[in-house]
Amino acid sequence: MTVPSRQSWRTVRDRIHAAILSGQYRPGARLPRDADLAEALDCARSTVQRAMQDLAAAGLVDRRRRGGTRVRTDPVTRATFDIPILRHEVESTGARYGYQLIRRQTASPPRPVQAALDLPEPVPMLHVEALHLADARPYMFEDRWISLQAAPGITRIDLARHSANEWLVRNIRYTHGEMMFFASAADARVAGFLDTAPGTALFVQDRTTWAGTRPITTLRATAAPGYRLRAPI
Amino acid sequence: MTVPSRQSWRTVRDRIHAAILSGQYRPGARLPRDADLAEALDCARSTVQRAMQDLAAAGLVDRRRRGGTRVRTDPVTRATFDIPILRHEVESTGARYGYQLIRRQTASPPRPVQAALDLPEPVPMLHVEALHLADARPYMFEDRWISLQAAPGITRIDLARHSANEWLVRNIRYTHGEMMFFASAADARVAGFLDTAPGTALFVQDRTTWAGTRPITTLRATAAPGYRLRAPI
DNA sequence: TAGTGGTCTAGACCACCGG
DNA sequence: CGGTGGTCTAGACCACTAT
């Protein structure tokens, strides 16, 4: 008869986690194999498997066929964070979201953009510059290049009213991408948009997305002073 | 008879993902329920479940009991990144790692540190300042406070030879924590350590970790100019 | 309250890799 | 080659919630 032991895989995970925290299994130590843990914890092996999968994803243990499961000697600190639609990010702080188009034109992207998109040769793309506002104050300046091949529909959008950000995220799905975060001193132009002094230290993110091998868009977003990116770990 | 259909859950996931990308299921649309998808894709329901779990974790779909699975209208951009041990981060670039202790003393933490750790009242902690080097050049300046209650063993470590970073990560396990990233202008002292001019825009990360409700350590790491944090999405 | 996802079980075979 | 994790299956019951 099926006798579900009423313990979720999370409980099993936490028990194993606690055992590691307590020092029962030291860094580098090998844990019992799944089957034995399952017996000890009175659950099915697949439940242990599910729990271990989570611990491995969190970077706490390392699992190898034949090699067994070991407590990682050098656990990585793994953080996950969400980049929401800017409108929601702003509104979640209680501020009113605003948006302002600065530039919209078709052009051939400069070398750095070509490189970021892995373009072998220049292809006309849509270049958009926009300012996102929180309570009418500058929040983030966006400099974006959009592939007309990957997102042809973008040309029919009134970008003075709708942010390319939102349209793209809602209409063009990506398979993968890359983000880069760094600090940069504001140049005169960006400083002007963000209403700050040139040279101010600003938080910048570059983001590029693809659908398969086809680039969709690459973006440089420069946040106004005071911006912080949070991530739980 | 058991007839494994030789398709991994990843294949099932990718087929569903492709169907969404192709527009077969538009944003907001409801997907068939797991059981029907399983039949259509000729696999077990648990395989579809595993695939959907991944798509939901990636933020592409939203799953609710009774409500079914829907393509997210506002998919979040979710990034995961690893914060490795600095020694490894430096060495992976081909550079030689160096480490230099600047300060080590027991003291009562200042207000901001108390607040970050949720400390109701001041408690003596170990304060460590150190400089991490890449090929003998400044790489990152670390300003750390360590709970003597959570990590008593740290007092026996020769922090002039071993970075607190490495010892903690190898010996004290945390249950959760928080990271914050932002840009900051170098003050005179940090500028001196990082061999740059005061006012330079620098990439800063604050990191705090707990074991349950007990704080372990809080850290502010200021990277030398040029530092970039990468994250695949 | 009915329908859907969430989880558990027991068993099987496979893929990888260390000894 | 043998042992371990990875995955799949079929079936069952549970938990949540949209209707």
Image (cartoon, coloured by chain):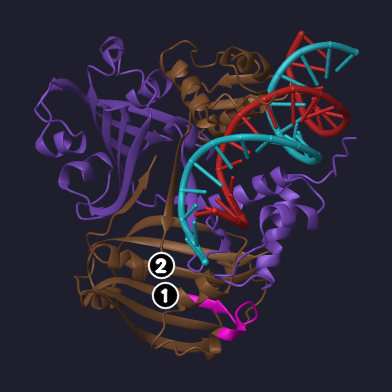
Chain colours: A brown, B purple, C red, D cyan
Q: Residue at x 33, y 41 (%)?
A: B178
Q: Is residue B205 above or below residue D12?
A: below
Q: Residue at x 66, y 28 (%)?
A: A46
Residue B52 position, x and y percent, is: 63, 51
Q: Which mark is residue A143?
A: 1
Residue hosting label 2: A85
Q: Nearer the viewer, residue B81 or A94?
A: A94
User: What kind of residue is marked 2?
Assistant: Ile
Q: Residue at x 33, y 64 (%)?
A: A89
Disc 1: CA contacts within 10 A as few (<14), some (14-19) or many (>=20)? some
Label located before the other in sequence (1 or 2): 2
Q: Is residue B98 above or below residue D15?
A: above
Q: Is residue A211 above or below residue B65?
A: below
Instruction: Check the picture and name the quadrant holding the N terminus of chain B.
Output: top right
Residue B124, visible in the rendered structure: yes
Q: Residue at x 26, y 13 (%)?
A: B152
Residue A107, visible in the rendered structure: no
Q: Nearer the viewer, residue A7 or A19?
A: A7
Report the span colored magenta. A143-153
Would residue A177 be counted in the magenta stretch?
Answer: no
Nearest-to-viewer mark from 1 and 2: 2
Q: Is mark 1 in CB contact (under 8 Å) with mark 2?
A: no
Residue B165 position, x and y percent, is: 36, 27
Give the chain of mark 1: A
What is the distance, in whole Å, between disc 1 and disc 2 at their CAs? 16 Å
Residue B188 position, x and y percent, is: 16, 46
Instruction: Check the picture and name the quadrant holding the C terminus of chain B.
Output: bottom right
Q: Secondary structure at mark 1?
A: strand
Q: Quadrant of residue A39?
A: top right
Residue B159 position, x and y percent, is: 30, 18
